[in-house]
């Protein structure tokens, strides 16, 4: 763990000194005890406490984002307008020579041909060039927005990992208009946090950085060694297990608070189970999923006994 070391007679005094210097609260820091204090014998061998203190990951991310936003304010907002290429001069073609007219006598000798009226086909509407150009331009703008978002995202994440003394490889993939920043390295559990809380916060800050107010919006996803897929699998298994509990007891089951993405996974996993229904209750960030049995517990037990 990186951080600054503080020394005092006791661990609490060392932490108090760190908090006063960093102007933070106990909830904003994490620490480890480097040296346990010792009174020694008759004052001989007395040893002070040494603690290594650092800001929590979330606090560090907030500071870094604030610095990046400040840097972006100083950047010039007006981009140079590309020069409009001048059209090349059009050279008019020389008029074609008229064919020599037949003499009056020659025309008189020719047999008179019957004029048959021809059927005129209505003109078919052609595809307008502006519509095609608009679609091509839209695709080009989206591609440019993805490239710019990837560049900003890499710079933002690299700066964070540099501040945290973490050696992380960033692998970026684009799929269906989304950018996934897959992080690989050692000891990255600190970036995941409790049930992915830190990872979600990092993803939220990343999306603030890569998206301009008036530009094309790009969704960025931050993942660490396929953690999100494993978490989704765990939530689906948990949803079926708790749904079975609700059916057997006839009582509703309230899950722990989850973010909107994880709540959606629970709802989707049970949407085809007619024996239960789900809904969310509470306010963010403490909003929870509730699983309610649709079949009374007695009827459910009867069906289970008949099947057995």
Image (cartoon, rainbow, N blue to C red):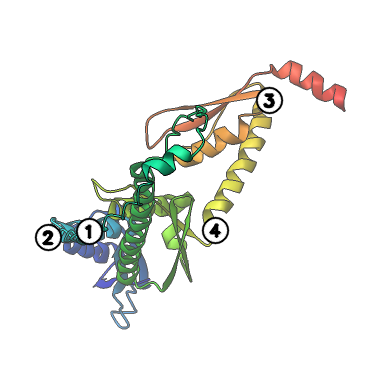
The answer to which of 211 and 45 lies nearer the viewer is 211
How far apart are the alpha carbons under marks 4 and 3? 33 Å
How far apart are the alpha carbons under marks 4 and 2? 37 Å
Residue 132 screen position, x and y as percent: 39, 45
The answer to which of 219 and 114 lies nearer the viewer is 114
Relative side of 24 to 148, left or right: left
Helix, strand or loop at mark 3 = helix
Mark 1 neighbour class, 10 Å CA radius: few under 14, some 14 to 19, many 20 or more: few
Lower position in the chain sequence, tag 4 or tag 2? 2
Helix, strand or loop at mark 2 = helix
Q: Are marks 4 and 2 in contact (CB under 8 Å)?
A: no
Pair 3/1: label in front: 1
Residue 261 screen position, x and y as percent: 47, 41
Where does label 3 land, which residue?
A: 247
How far apart are the alpha carbons under marks 2 and 3? 59 Å
Which residue appears at 64% of the width and 42% of the height?
A: 237
Where does label 2 land, which residue?
A: 74
Pair 4/2: label in front: 2
User: Which labelled disc corresponds to residue 226?
Assistant: 4
Q: Are marks 3 and 1 in contact (CB under 8 Å)?
A: no
The answer to which of 301 and 119 lies nearer the viewer is 119
Where does label 1 land, which residue?
A: 90
Relative side of 22 to 293, left or right: left
Lower position in the chain sequence, tag 4 or tag 3? 4
The answer to which of 299 and 119 lies nearer the viewer is 119
Lower position in the chain sequence, tag 2 or tag 3? 2
Which residue appears at 25% of the width and 73% of the height?
A: 7
Pair 4/3: label in front: 4
């Amino acid at each position: 763990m990186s951080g600054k070391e503080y020394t005092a007679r006791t661990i609490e005094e060392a932490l108090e000194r760190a908090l006063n210097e960093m102007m933070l609260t106990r909830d904003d820091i994490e620490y480890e005890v480097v040296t346990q204090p010792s009174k020694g014998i008759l004052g001989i061998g007395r040893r002070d406490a040494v603690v290594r203190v650092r800001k929590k990951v979330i606090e560090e991310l907030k500071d870094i984002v604030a610095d990046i936003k400040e840097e972006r304010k100083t950047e010039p907002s007006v981009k140079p307008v590309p020069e409009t290429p001048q059209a090349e001069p059009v050279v008019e073609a020389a008029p074609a020579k008229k064919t020599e007219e037949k003499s009056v006598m020659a025309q008189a000798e020719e047999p008179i041909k019957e004029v048959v009226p021809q059927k005129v086909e209505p003109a078919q509407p052609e595809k307008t060039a502006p519509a095609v150009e608009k679609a091509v331009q839209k695709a080009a703008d989206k591609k440019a927005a993805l490239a710019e978002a990837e560049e900003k995202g890499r710079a933002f994440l690299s700066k964070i990992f540099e501040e945290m003394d973490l050696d992380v490889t960033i692998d970026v993939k684009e799929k269906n208009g989304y950018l996934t920043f897959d992080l690989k390295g050692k000891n990255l559990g600190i970036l995941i946090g409790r049930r992915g809380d830190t990872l979600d916060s990092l993803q939220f800050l990343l999306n603030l950085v890569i998206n301009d107010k008036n530009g094309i919006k790009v969704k960025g996803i931050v993942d660490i060694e396929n953690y999100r897929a494993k978490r989704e699998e765990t939530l689906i298994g948990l949803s079926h297990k708790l749904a079975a509990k609700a059916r057997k007891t006839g009582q509703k089951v309230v899950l722990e608070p989850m973010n909107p993405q994880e709540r959606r996974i629970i709802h989707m996993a049970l949407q085809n189970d007619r024996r239960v229904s789900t809904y969310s209750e509470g306010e963010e960030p403490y909003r929870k999923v509730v699983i309610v049995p649709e079949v009374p517990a007695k009827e459910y037990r009867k069906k289970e006994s008949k099947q057995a």
